Image (cartoon, rainbow, N blue to C red):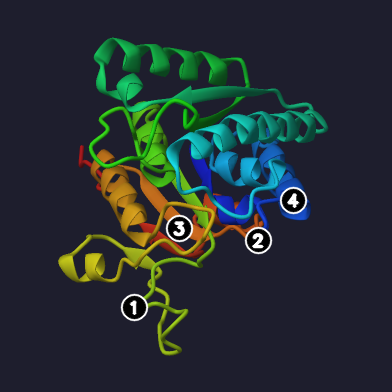
Amino acid sequence: MKIVIKVGTSTLAHATGRLNIRRVEHLVKVLSDLKNSGHQLILVSSGAIGMGVGKLNLPGRPTDMPTKQAAAAVGQCELMYIYDQMFSQYSHTVAQILLTREDINFSERRQNFENIMNRLLDLNALPIINENDAVATDEVGVSTTIGENDTLSAVVACCVDADLLVLLSDIDGLYTADPRKDPHATLIPVVETITPSLEELAGAPGSSLGTGGMATKLKAAEAAMEHGFDMVIANGQRPEMLYDIVSGKPVGTRFVGRRTSI
C-alpha cells in the first residue's frame, strides 16, 4: 500500500521540547520494517518548532511570530538530521519537502509536487514532509498557510492517491467524550459518516507544543473519506501498532473511505 503517516509533536518530543529518543528510534524501526515489506511510505512530521524550542533553550512554545519562525528554522534542521541518521541505519534514504498553501492551491505547483512525490517513491526514498513554517505563518487570514499537519497530511494523501492515512497523536482515537475529563468516555472504533454530533466531540489542542486537536483530525478524516481511502487515529506512544493498522486490525478509530462501486 501507499501509506501516509503523520506524527505529531507530542509523539516526537518530551514536554520540554527535547527529542523523545526512545520513541523516535522505535518509530523509525517500525517504519523501516514496513518499507522493507514492500509498502510505500510518506511521513508527515511535526516537531520543527517544538525541537527548535528545545534547541534554543526557550522556556516554552513562542507566542510571537518571528520567534516561532526562528524556532522552526532551527528545529527543522535538527529534525531532518535525526531522521537521516536513524533511517540510514536501516539503509533507507529520506528526502525533505517543505510546503506552503501556494504549493497546493496553484495547479502548476501542485503538479510539480505530485511529480516529485511519485519520482521519490519510484526511487524507493522516504519523503518527509512538513509545512515551511520558517516562511509561512499561522496568523488568521494568511492565505499561504496550511495551518497544521493534520490538514497537511490529508492534502498530501489526496495528492498522491494514498491507500491509507494514519494520524499518530497523544490520544487513542475518537471518544464519546473527552477521556481526560470523563472517566466514562469510550473509544469509537469505526466511523463511516461524520455527523454533527461527532463534530461536537472535537476538542481543543491537547499539547502545549503542538497545534492540532480533534477538530482538525475530523477535517482530515472528511477529506480522506471523500477521496475514498481510510484514515486511522491512533496513539503514537506505541509505534508497533502500525503493523496492526496496516493489516486492517481494530486499532484506534478508523474512518472508512467512501468506496465507489464498479
Disc 4 to disc 3: CB gap under 8 Å: no
Residue that sits furthest to the left in the current view: 196
User: Alpha carbon of mark 4 to alpha carbon of mark 3: how far?
Assistant: 18 Å
> Which dot marks residue 238?
2
The residue indicated by pointer 4 is 26
* Viewer-proximal residue among 191 and 8: 8
| 200 up-or-down from 249: above or below | below
- Which label's residue is closer to the chain start, 3 or 1? 1
Residue hosting label 3: 233
Which residue is located at x 22 percent, y 41 percent?
A: 260
Relative to 127, residue 11 above or below: below
Residue 257 in view here: no
**Residue 97 in the image: x percent, y percent?**
52, 23
Q: Earlier in the sequence, mark 4 or mark 2?
A: 4
**Quadrant hosting residue 126:** top right
Give the alpha-carbon distance from disc 3 to disc 1, as whole Å: 14 Å
Q: Residue at position x 26%, y 17% from top?
A: 106
Point out the tag, 4 or 3, that comes first from the N-terminus.
Answer: 4
Mark 4 residue crowding within 10 angstroms, few (<14) / some (14–19) / many (20+): some
- Local crowd at mark 1 within 10 Å, few (<14), some, or many (≥20)? some
Q: CA distance from mark 4 to mark 1?
A: 30 Å
Q: Amino acid at mark 1?
A: Thr
Q: Position of residue 224 (x, y in %)?
A: 32, 44
Question: For mark 1, what is the residue?
Answer: 176
